[in-house]
Image (spheres, grey):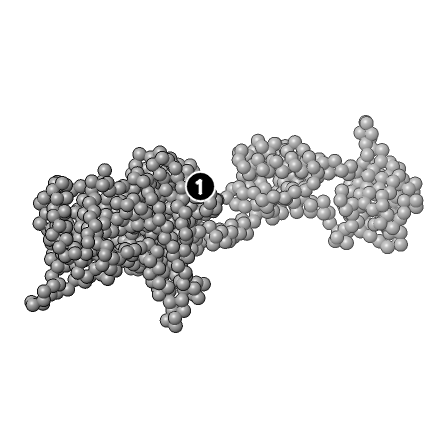
Amino acid sequence: MTGLNTATVSRQGIVTSWSDGAQRLLGHPATDVVGRVITELLAADPSDAAWAALAGAEAWSGTVAVRHRDGSRLDLGLRACPSLDSEGNATGFVLAFAPNPAGNGDGDDREMPERSFTQASVALATFDTELRYQGLNDIACEMAGTTAAQLRGRRYRDTVSDNVATRGFVRHLRQVIETGTPTSYDSQFGGRAWNIEMWPVKDPSGRVHGVGTASFDNSAQHWAQQRLALLNEAGTRIGTTLDVLRTAQELTELVVPRLADFVSVDLLDSVLQGEEPTAEPIDAGVVLRRVAHRSAVEGVPEAAVALGAVDTYPPYSPPARCLAVGRSFLSGLEDPDFVRWIEGDDVRNANVHHAGVHSGMAVPLRARGITLGVAVFWRRLRPEPFQPDDLVLAEELAGRAAVCVDNARRYTREYTAALTLQRSLLPRRLPGQAAVEAAFRYLPADTQAGAGGDWFDVIPLSGTRVALVVGDVAGHGVRASATMGSLRTAVRTLADVDLPPDELLTHLDDLVTHLTSDDDGTTASDAQDADGISATCLYAVYDPVSRRCTLASAGHPPPGVLYPDGTVTLVDLSPGPPLGVGGLPFEATELELPEGSLIALYTDGLIEARDHDIDAGLDRLCQALASPSPSLEVTCDTLIDALLTFPTVRPGEPPSRSPSDLRPRGSPSRFPRPTDDVALLVARIRALHTDQVATWGLPADPEIVADARLQASRQLKAWGLEEAGFITELVVSELVTNAIRYGAAPIQLRLIRDRTLICEVSDGNSAAPHLRRARTFDEGGRGLLLVSQLTQGWGTRQTTSGKTIWAEQLLPTGSAGGFR
């Protein structure tokens, strides 16, 4: 017995052993005590009942007056147990001394330990090594729902149901028995949280004879910690993206099953569209869209509304009531409005009653003074209903989610506006021309990055030529999209005056420099760390008559070319600096493209990725370009799949309602989004043959004008275009006359039969003519006016040796030529 001091005496009262504890307590060493009569040594009062009990060989316990070695009197607790032989006769006694706290020797404290055990404020129980009950106090009996007498001697597993808490309790009991060391752990059962202490009960030899347990109810502290943990987690787990649907889903994932067994989040449709919801209270039946729900049970049996579906909540329902008054509600089966709402819908009524829902909370989602929707919490697995503390916690979590949903809504509005602007600046369809057959793809970047500044274009030029353009403005957002629109417009304007690719990029570079200039004249090179614009561009002009393609690059990656024989190469460009650097020249590269060749222009988002460098991306591009393909559309998809493994989005499609879902319908959703915009333009080369082009060199002699008209008339007859003879002869006459009168040698006349009939006159003077209004008595100045009135269009372009003036006229129906 811990804290007792022992001695043994014979049947005659002679001390036979004396413990160290007895020596410390009474001061007598064993050498002075063993062999002496105990009453002569210790009895301060020989008439005490204790010594009479020893003389009568009876067991005894109580308080006895003894004499210390120094002669002082001590009142000690004494327990005397007789030692019996095989026939049950007493052969001696085991004595155990303990200090008496009362110190007065009055009364019998034998029941004190038992009363202390029984009346303890914590649940106490003892078990033997077979896990049988040996004792329980009142609190433990109350928890078990029975009496100690009914449990004593029964195995613990036979008195409880099998669950996680029961298995954990048994496991820890066996651990203490096997190891002989105390342990403690936390558990939950009976709707409360417990801290359970276990310790081994050992005999004097140290062998484990049982286990003592104490269970402390720490429910208040536990649930307070759980609420605090939920609030802390809400700061990191809710609002990880600027996506309305994902934010709502994060709220449900956080609270199920830690706070509720089922949670649903319904929002106003205006929130999903990024619009500004009304700030006025909602006082009528409200229409909400289910955006997220979650259940602790697989299959979400409590849900009466499918994800994405719309439901109308009547005014008396808890969701509508909380939205109308702007505060939360606790409700349950005792709430008549709750029951009325449940029973008003057959599906909801069946689901709720089948699932056993008994308690609920409706919490409005409000942020910045506007109502966004409602979150509804239900309990069915936990027997305890929601409490006011649970409602306060739900309001805190819903408030956090509402702010994040509103941030996502505002971002949706801004992103949709930027994306709409960006798409409005890109071509919705390619213009009609016959020099190339083209197809394109445009993929917006990840929504976190925002709208970007990638663009592409196909621009018809005079003489059946065509310009292919791809550009990329660094950065994302409205500013990048607006800059992209400015550059695309500038390229079209500069292309309209038929500038060569290198000169066009020079003018475009000047424009970017002006766009990034500050009021005090700071240029982009000085402000590149501030608000400078950085952009790249590739501009290519293809002439189907000469089958020559001229390209110039401003810091842009080279295009890939697939030749008719299956060879794939990257065009060896002389890359210039990115736009906006200024002061550095651009150099044009010219190559011949056989008919049937395929050229691919793209932005760096196609070939750059986190998992590989640009060289690896270019290699993959060439490999994918060499793959057989039945059409350019398939070629585009092949390139996208090979380099990004990402579905396509074509410009001009209406933006999705949510920025989290910009894929076209039916596109696989497993593919990651690119981190940068991707623009891809693929063109198959066509060519004009000799029977579609007629060319004559002319001397600078006015008499040759009549011969030029005759040559043109004969060629039209050969092409079966006699109906166009009158206008063509007039155009030839005026343009050749102007070239002879105002131009310089050499002079050349060329007719091109394409979808239209094109008449071109070239000369060695670079001065361009201007259309003017002739006065009444002027002898000249009417030629170009007649040409502009009789043809579909006319213009002039500079050449390396001078200029070319052209005029284009529609062909009679059914007589148009075209590419073979």
Direction from residue 759 to residue 534 in the image, left or right: right
Instruction: Identify the secondary structure beneath mark 1.
Output: helix
Pinpoint residue 145: horizontal percent, then vertical percent.
Answer: 54, 39
Q: Residue furthest left?
A: 776
What residue is shown at x 63% (from left), y 35% (from top)? 133
**Residue position marked by numbered label 1 in the rendering:** 619
Q: Nearer the viewer, residue 298 or 425?
A: 425
Instruction: Say above or below: 43 vs 356.
Output: below
Pinpoint residue 369: horizontal percent, then vertical percent.
Answer: 35, 61
**In this rendering, does residue 317 appear at all?**
no
Residue 718, image quadrant: top left
What residue is shown at x 72% (from left), y 36% (from top)? 208
Q: Residue furthest top?
A: 87
What residue is shown at x 61% (from left), y 32% (from top)? 155
Q: Nearer the viewer, residue 637 or 524?
A: 524
Direction from residue 49 to residue 366 in the image, left or right: left
Direction from residue 641 to residue 791 in the image, left or right: left
Q: Nearer the viewer, residue 778 or 459?
A: 778
